[in-house]
Image (cartoon, rainbow, N blue to C red):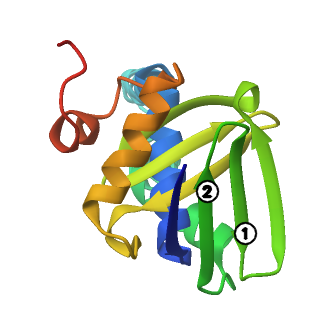
Amino acid sequence: MVEITYTNTGGDQIVQAQALLRDRGSSFTFYHYFWVLYWAAMAALGVYVSLFVGQIFIACIFGAMFLLYAVVALPYSRVWHRWARQVSRGSARKHIRLRLDEQGLHETVEGAVESFAPWDAVRSFAVFEGHLFVELAGDLWANVPRATVAEGDAAFEEVVQILRNRGVAEQPSNHAMQRTAPSSDA
C-alpha cells in the first residue's frame, strides 16, 4: 500500500489539457494544418484567376479572407492554451490524498470527498512534463504533479512503479516518461 498527498491547481489542469491534446497526436494536428494549406491553395487560385481577368479588387478580397482565416488558425497552440485556461478558470487549489492498495485507487479531495476506482477501472497512465496522469474508466483522470507530492520524488516513482507492476498500460508517446522513469526493458 502506498499513500501520497499532493495539490492540484488550475495550472495543473492546463498541463493535462496539453497532454490530452498531444496524446490525440499528430493526426489531429496534421488535419488542422492540412485544412490551412487547403484554404491557402484555394485563396491563391482565387487571387490568380482574379488577377488573370483583371479584377484586382476581387483578388484583394480573396487575399484578405485567407489572411483573416490564417490569423485565427495558425496560432494553434495559443488557441488550445487559451481554451485550457478557460476550462480551469475558477479552479482553486485542491489538496488530494491518493492511496493505492490491493483493491485499487482511493482518492480523498480536501479531506471530504472520497472516491474509489478498482484496478480494472484503471485504463492507462502517462508521465508528461512532471505530471502523472492516470486514466480511469468513464473518461476520468487523476492528475498527480510531481513537484507537489509531499512525500517527495521517491513516492512519485513508487506510484509509477506500482502502476507498471499491476500491468496498467503505459502511454509511450510522452518524452517526459523516458526522462523521469527507469526503462522497463530489463
Q: Position of residue 88 (x, y in %)?
A: 64, 72
Cβ–Cβ below 8 Å for labels 2 and 1?
yes
Q: Position of residue 144 (x, y in %)?
A: 49, 59
Residue type, label 2: Arg
Q: Which mark is residue 108?
A: 1
Please tell me in which quadrant of the rendered image residue 106 appears: bottom right
Q: Position of residue 116 (x, y in %)?
A: 80, 50
Please tell me in which quadrant of the rendered image residue 87 appears: bottom right
Q: Nearer the viewer, residue 73 or 17?
A: 17
Q: Which mark is residue 99?
A: 2
In the displayed structure image, the side of residue 82 where residue 94 appears, left or right: right
Q: Position of residue 26 (x, y in %)?
A: 41, 24
Q: Residue at x 61, y 69 (%)?
A: 97
Q: Residue at x 53, y 24 (%)?
A: 166
Residue 61 seen by the camera: no
In the displayed structure image, the side of residue 28 where residue 137 appears, left or right: right
Give the CA distance from mark 2 to mark 1: 9 Å
Q: Nearer the viewer, residue 118 or 82?
A: 118
User: Which quarter shows the C terminus?
Assistant: top left
Residue type, label 1: Thr
Q: How many numbered badges does the structure rendering display? A: 2
Q: Crowding near pointer 2: few (<14 within 10 Å), some, many (20+)?
A: some
* Residue 40 drawn above or below residue 60: above
